[in-house]
Amino acid sequence: DQQVKQNSPSLSVQEGRISILNCDYTNSMFDYFLWYKKYPAEGPTFLISISSIKDKNEDGRFTVFLNKSAKHLSLHIVPSQPGDSAVYFCAASGGFKTIFGAGTRLFVKA
Amino acid sequence: KAGVTQTPRYLIKTRGQQVTLSCSPISGHRSVSWYQQTPGQGLQFLFEYFSETQRNKGNFPGRFSGRQFSNSRSEMNVSTLELGDSALYLCASSPGTDTREQYFGPGTRLTVT
């Protein structure tokens, strides 16, 4: 039962271009959505979040968009930098549970 | 403030054995969640504790159990280890009463042979 899905296991982008990572969820009880970034041998670190009452949240180069009717959210990174190369996890939170997607590995080529 | 710490960082066990992993949350955080990370499966939610009470549990067999102590430190135990239990086990602590804001430890890499 995958309540949070990241259908692209990997994404390759040229430095300076836009990276778009996608995530779908199935449960309407989720009211808060987050993106985490993970480097090898480290735990995930929080990147950006959005409440279900909003449709966009921006923080520097990172913007998260939420489409509640489609149960879809996306993370935009502009411009992409080689240091952004990592695994990105989408997460949906409701109550005392946070469910993570399988992750998307982003490669930013110099 | 010190971050979330997990011990041990690496562990090798034999099938059929049991294992106990430890997590110390950030000072002042009372919620602790546990996740299992395997390639292609992302982070699978195991359970969450708040003030020594398990508030939520994922879809794992009863061989996986946990507890939280009065100082918020948490342990998880896996009995009768199987090869498929090989994974990175991550612990995360949260400052509030919900789990929206989570701070992760570096994880414990468990290998079952």
Image (cartoon, grey):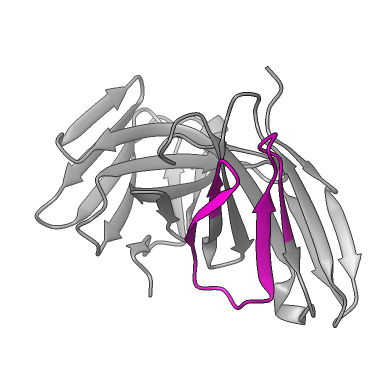
Residue nearest the observer in this picture, B57 or A79? B57
Give residue B91's position: percent from left, percent from top: 64, 47
- Seen in the picture, residue A10 relative to A96 is either above or below; the reply is below
- Looking at the image, residue B90 sits to the left or right of residue A99; the answer is right
Residue at the spot x=34%, y=65% of the render?
A3
Question: Residue B77 sits in which quadrant?
Answer: bottom right
Q: Residue B63 colored magenta? A: yes
Give residue A17's position: percent from left, percent from top: 36, 34
- Looking at the image, residue B7 sits to the left or right of residue A58; the answer is right
Question: Residue A31 sits in which quadrant?
Answer: top left
- Seen in the picture, residue A73 relative to B2 is either above or below; the reply is below
Give residue B76's position: percent from left, percent from top: 71, 58
- Seen in the picture, residue A61 relative to A102 is either above or below; the reply is above
Which residues, given as a range, are shown in magenta? B48-76
**Quarter in which the C terminus of chain A is drawn:** top right
Residue at the spot x=90%, y=65% of the render?
B12
- Looking at the image, residue B50 sits to the left or right of residue B100; the answer is right
- Seen in the picture, residue A41 relative to B18 is either above or below; the reply is above
Residue nearest the observer in this picture, A91 or B30? B30
